[in-house]
Image (cartoon, helix red, strand yellow):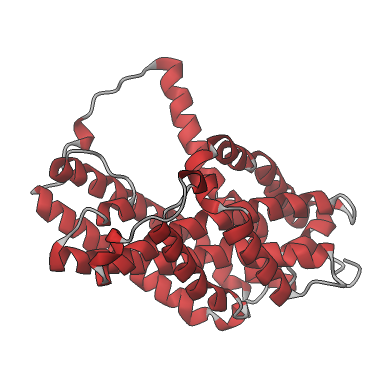
Amino acid sequence: MVDAIPLMLNGAIGAHYHIPYPIVARASFGYYLSRFAVVTRMATALFWHAIQSWTGSTAMFQIIRAIWPGFLDIPNRLPESAGITSNELIAHFVFFCVQFPILLTPPHKLKYFFAFKTLIVPVVSIATVVVMVRKAGGVGDIWNQEYTTSGSARSWIILNNFSSQCGGWATMATNIPDFTRYMHSSRGVYWQALFLPVINLLMSMFGVISTSCAKVVYGEYIWSPLELAAQWDGPGGRCGAFFVGFCWVVAQIGTNLSASVISCSNDLISLFPKHINMRRGVILTTFTSCWIMVPWKIVYSASSLLNFMSGLAIFLAPIAALLCTDYWIVKGRNFDVPAL
């Protein structure tokens, strides 16, 4: 609910006036200071796109090895300093080739893609939970662990994890007008307050149950569904790994569209309106994040950079709060759009 409230309040701005996040930021921060809000969101989008694209590449890795098991035996021709193996690089290139044309598609034409994502992710997630519960003969014993901390230390752990979960959605809470601007009616925005907490709760429960079952079946807690699918072998196991990989390829492309590419492109347009349009913004964002920023090194070696990315929520949360407060309270839902 903490994230659903600003998503709903800021989403209503885009649905009402059909303007993107950079224009909304001008109303609250002014013409020059709004560039700080835009650049902050753009930096988050670039790094987040890089990280999510690499996650999509690991999902594509599972698809390829499920179809061609010999893919795992490809000799590595890259040095250790590259931070990536030959077959991982192939999977990353294939994912990039699949993702790129979808990212170039105008957002208003992707309604059916997001409807497909909304269908396939819960279905495959439920199937994964069912399979793991059947393999483990129950839901495991992760629930029976004893607390190892107490007092203020435990409170800080709870607060840290709460902040981490909220920070992941702070990006969308900030730039949600980039998507609600395409809505014909603003009524759909308010359903987010109901759907977001329910969906997040279900997905979290599926993850915890599958992880608990992994401890019983494989002897260790495996939190990533892709690492879990990597344990599955044989014809039936590879079939399951294929569907898990396919599900997360679709999910990551959808995440990149909604949380990174479109928002970053709008930010670039607002900063360089004479030179950048939506298509050029998508191309610049995608090539920069997927190749120039070397996402596999970001994920595997730059823990301090990931901490920095999490810390950006410190800036995004106040920005999101100022946007909705300015619109709903200070300006009473009245914007001079032509002036902006």
Q: Quadrant of residue 62?
A: bottom left
**Most extreme residue toward the top, as rendered?**
151
- Evaluate whether residue 173 shows in this view: no
Residue under the image location 26 percent in, 70 percent down: 68
* Residue depicted at x 89% and y 56%: 31
Q: Residue furthest left?
A: 137
Q: Position of residue 265 (x, y in %)?
A: 70, 67
Q: Is residue 339 left or right of residue 149?
A: right
> Residue at the location (54% across, 77% down)?
102
Whole-percent x, y for residue 48 in the image: 57, 53
Q: Is residue 96 visible?
A: yes
Please tell me which residue is depicted at 77% across the width and 61% down the height of the picture.
Answer: 22
On screen, residue 194 above or below 119: above
Question: In the visual, does 297 lie left or right of 86?
Answer: right
Q: Is 216 positioned to the left or the right of 52 in the image?
A: left
Q: Would you place residue 4 above or below residue 244 in this image?
A: above
Q: Quadrant of residue 337?
A: bottom right
Tell which of 97 and 173 is nearer to you: 97
Label total for image: 0
Quadrant of image for the C terminus: bottom right
Q: Position of residue 55 (x, y in %)?
A: 44, 56
Q: Position of residue 306 (x, y in %)?
A: 56, 41
